[in-house]
Image (cartoon, rainbow, N blue to C red):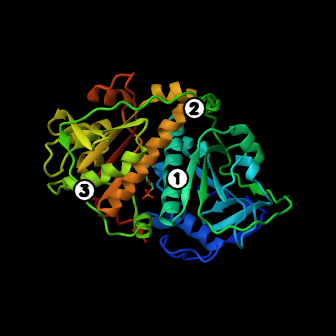
């Protein structure tokens, strides 16, 4: 297993103040603002211990397939109070910022925001385990990381914007990234206290640590990544609209704070089956949270135990918060079977197939659209995780499923889309390995 932490050796390391206040409290200075932002989006939040060996490993605020964390957080700051302008890499293992260079680096992303994140993927971290399928998981992970940053910034009274179109190779070069790391998404953050401050550029660079002694090449991953580098932009056709016969009730509200929710979010290992159900206002709240993001993703639900809804498969239509019945009957065996035989999709109260409209994305963005559909799926998943946690439920993203069987089961034609992500929400079984 490759090292899950990247370090740049030989660079100055800046402290991000420990135990930053909750996101709702205004930060006193920029180091605290950055610390808050990263503590509630990318930091370590818990650990697990393997009982048989005593081996302890870290878990983070953002989820990741196999807990392998292919995503790295680089950021450019400009004009922040009490924080030198420069280029940084976040070191989650000690909640610190590695200062790779000082000076003005806004030209790299062509953005005038005071903080600009460049999220990168190290595909090898996923590929050693998931082989060719790893590319998808890297993209999902970027979607999760994007929402983790966007929602933390929002909770702190700030604003964020994701930029998907940029010249990959130029950015990789400008950031002096190691050859195993690929830029995937740029996220601007506004809202921090700023001042004008000009610095001459000084590079410390640092040496990226080698993640494993040996790497195995995955040519198909290299090829699809290369195929999605070219930027093509034409008009995005609107998402298909439709309606369902079931109107969802108003969503239930959560009283838990954002900070508490993100720091306690975990993936459920499995869910308690049996008879305990969720209410339909809870289901409404879960779905309402995803609605602002649904552009290329269609949500299909395998309803197992939701008060007032017959078990069955439903399609969610976000415009008027409606459900359309697609199939009746108990879906527990089907949902688990389609999710590569993972029981958790059957023991949940509700499971999901996310269908990505890859053709429409390709018509708008060329092959690069493949990335955007998966980013959106990851982002939708992230919102489902946090909404579930806020309601006292558990959730798990599911990247393993039988693609063709899902299409057949849901009667999804190639023109309509392809399954890109599964998800499950219910009452989690306790995980004895988990430590706060
Ligand atoms: C894209 C993605 C795919 C995942 N696929 C699965 C899966 O197929 N089965 C599963 O049990 N967990 C899956 N997970 C959950 C991860 O195993 C979990 O996020 C990771 O172990 C870290 O734990 P945490 O979410 O509690 O931080 C997935 C998570 C993500 C983000």
The location of residue 80, given as percent across then percent down, is 69, 67
From the viewer's side, name the closer residue of 156 and 7.
156
Q: Seen in the image, is 53 located left or right of residue 87? A: left
Q: CB under 8 Å between callouts 2 and 3?
A: no
Q: Report the label total.
A: 3
Q: Name the residue located 53 percent from the left edge and 61 percent from the top edge.
A: 153
Identify the mark nearer the N-term, 1 or 3.
Answer: 1
User: Which residue is nearer to you in this view: 261 or 25?
Assistant: 25
Q: Residue at x 52, y 65 (%)?
A: 44
Distance between the alpha carbons at the discs numbered 1 and 3: 25 Å
Please name the residue shown 31% across and 52% down the image: 286
Give whichever of discs 2 and 1 has the lower sequence position: 1
Task: Classify mark 1: helix, strand or loop.
Answer: helix
SS of the residue under disc 2: helix
Q: Taking the image as drawn, is residue 411 in sight? A: yes
Q: Is residue 171 left or right of residue 402?
A: right
Looking at the image, residue 215 lies above or below residue 31: above
Label 2 sits on residue:
368
Look at the picture and state if 22 lies above or below 381: below
Residue 389: image location, x then y, percent: 34, 61
Left or right: residue 287 compared with residue 212: left
Find residue 294 and report its image quarter. top left
Q: Does the residue labelled 3 lie within 8 Å of ligand 1?
A: no
**First in sequence: mark 2 vs mark 3:** 3
Distance between the Cα atoms at labels 2 and 3? 35 Å
- Few, some or many C-alpha atoms within 10 Å of disc 3 (few <14, some 14-19, many ≥20)? many
Q: For the C terminus, give its image quadrant.
A: bottom left
Q: Image quadrant of residue 310?
A: top left
Residue marked by disc 3 = 282
Residue annotated with mark 1 = 145
């Amino acid at each position: 297993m490759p090292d899950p932490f990247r370090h740049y050796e030989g660079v100055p390391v800046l402290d991000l103040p420990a135990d930053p206040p909750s996101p709702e409290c205004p930060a006193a200075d920029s180091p605290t603002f950055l610390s808050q932002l990263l503590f509630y989006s990318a930091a370590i939040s818990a650990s697990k211990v393997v009982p048989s060996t005593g081996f302890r490993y870290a878990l983070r605020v953002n989820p990741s397939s196999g807990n392998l964390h292919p995503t790295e957080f680089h950021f450019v700051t400009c004009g922040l109070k009490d924080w030198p302008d420069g280029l940084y890499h976040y070191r989650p293992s000690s909640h610190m910022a590695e200062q790779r260079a000082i000076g003005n680096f806004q030209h790299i992303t062509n953005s005038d925001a005071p903080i600009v994140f460049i999220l990168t993927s190290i595909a090898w971290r996923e590929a050693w385990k998931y082989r060719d399928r790893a590319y998808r998981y890297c993209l999902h992970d970027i979607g999760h990381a994007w929402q983790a940053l966007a929602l933390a910034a929002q909770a702190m009274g700030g604003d964020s914007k994701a930029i998907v179109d940029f010249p990959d190779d130029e950015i990789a070069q400008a950031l002096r990234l190691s050859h195993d790391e690929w830029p995937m998404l740029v996220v601007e953050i506004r809202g921090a206290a700023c001042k004008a401050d000009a610095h001459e550029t000084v590079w410390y660079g640092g040496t990226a640590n080698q993640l494993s002694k040996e790497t195995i090449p995955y040519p198909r991953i290299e090829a699809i990544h290369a195929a999605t580098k070219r930027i093509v932009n034409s008009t995005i056709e609107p998402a298909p609209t439709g309606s369902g016969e079931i109107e969802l009730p108003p969503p239930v509200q959560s009283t838990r704070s954002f900070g508490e929710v993100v720091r306690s979010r975990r993936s459920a290992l499995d869910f308690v089956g049996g008879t305990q159900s969720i209410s339909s206002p809870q289901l409404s709240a879960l779905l309402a949270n995803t609605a602002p993001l649904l552009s290329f993703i269609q949500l299909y639900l395998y309803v197992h135990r939701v008060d007032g809804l017959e078990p069955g498969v439903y399609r969610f239509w976000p415009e008027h918060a409606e459900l359309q019945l697609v199939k009746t009957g108990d879906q527990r065996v089907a949902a688990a079977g389609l999710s590569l035989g993972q029981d958790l999709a059957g023991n949940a109260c509700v499971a999901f197939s996310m269908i990505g409209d890859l053709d429409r994305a390709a018509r708008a963005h060329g092959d690069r659209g493949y990335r955007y559909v998966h980013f959106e799926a990851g982002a939708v998943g992230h919102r489902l995780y946090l909404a579930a946690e806020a309601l006292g439920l558990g959730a798990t993203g599911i990247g393993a499923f039988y693609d063709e069987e899902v299409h057949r089961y849901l009667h999804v034609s190639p023109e309509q889309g392809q399954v890109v992500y599964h998800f499950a929400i219910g009452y989690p079984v306790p995980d004895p390995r988990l430590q706060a």
